[in-house]
Amino acid sequence: MNIYFNEGKLFSSKALKKLKTVGNVIYSDNSKSIDSKKKSEILFVKLNEKIDKKFLSKFINLKIIVSPTTSITHIDQKICKLRNIKIIKLKSSDKSLKKITSTAELTIALILSLKRNIHKSFYNTKLNKIYSRYNYTGDSLSGLTIGIIGLGRIGKMVAKLSKSFNMNVIAYDIKKINKYPKYINLKKNIESIFKLSDIISLHISESEDNYNFVSKKLINMSKKNPLFINTSRGEFVDEASLFNALKKGVLSGLGLDVLKEDFNANKIKYLMRENSDLNILFTPHIGGCTQNEMKITEEIVVENLLKELKII
């Protein structure tokens, strides 16, 4: 059995050791030949490339794709279904995921930078444009209201971290939530989140039903010129309306770890250029990108693969 790693760099040594007992591990860094792709039955991917029809056409014997991610929007699922390629990813039932806090931490980091103008002050200092400290006067988080859309695993983590900053936490989830901490004020409708929040943070699960979930209508309901943070998925937001709202002052800032086209470098350059004077922070989908936690997720999906192969 041939197992091809499209991004093998820094992969968990523990997980690799297990894989090597069941198959021949091939790394893209070391093998550029078409033959190695043709022979591979299992493909490990992360988030550096779009796994589309053209990419998969080189893997003619492929049976399984493994991705240590909760979302698989980077994989063309229609092609996989057509070719009967099974996709193995992280599942909400994976108990070890409770240890993964990196995306929630990044959410708070984006909020802090946007509220305290850390990114602006650093950038200008780096360019020797050291202005008065008063040019970077921001807001403390204490007493502000954060509205969390989606009260799943990450949403609850963000709520807990927000509470430690003495923020008021309100939340909305399309599903009925029976168990949640008392400090969370759960709202019955999503409109309340946009009307009452100083900061809005999106944490909904992957589903085609959620595409453009945050619509122009919802965005324009914002009453307090909130920050909008998205460490979930770019597809879940009407991006054009989001940027228009920022330009018009309906929103006071954007912290985006994801975009609708994460892999489109030209789009990102365009957005950076067009919005350079606004309170905006882009990061290249680094929510789960921490060494220790990537190793945990890699070990989880390898276990899931071995179960699929009925080896454990």
Image: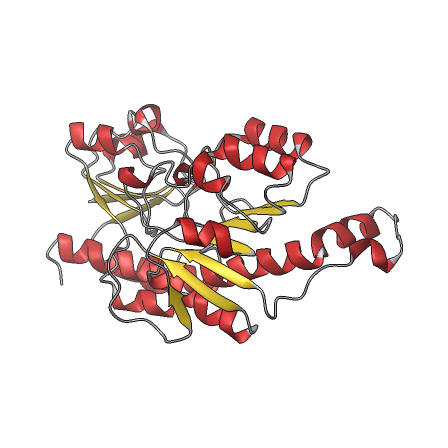
Query: Closest to the observer: 60 or 134?
Result: 134
Residue 270 position, x and y percent, is 62, 28
**Residue 64 lies in quadrant:** top left
The answer to whether residue 200 is seen in the rendering is yes
Which image quarter is the N terminus in?
Answer: top left
Which image quarter is the C terminus in?
Answer: bottom left
**Residue 37 lies in quadrant:** top left
Rendered image coloring scheme: secondary structure
Residue 279 position, x and y percent, is 67, 45
Question: Relative to residue 62, is residue 36 drawn left or right?
Answer: right
Query: Closest to the observer: 289 or 183?
Result: 183
Question: Relative to residue 188, is residue 251 drawn left or right?
Answer: right
Count of residue discs: 0
In the rendered image, the vertical position of residue 137 relative to residue 143, given as above or below: above
For image coordinates 53% across by 63% down, the residue present is 145
Residue 285 position, x and y percent, is 49, 46
For image coordinates 30% across by 68% down, the residue present is 96
For image coordinates 27% across by 50% down, the residue present is 89
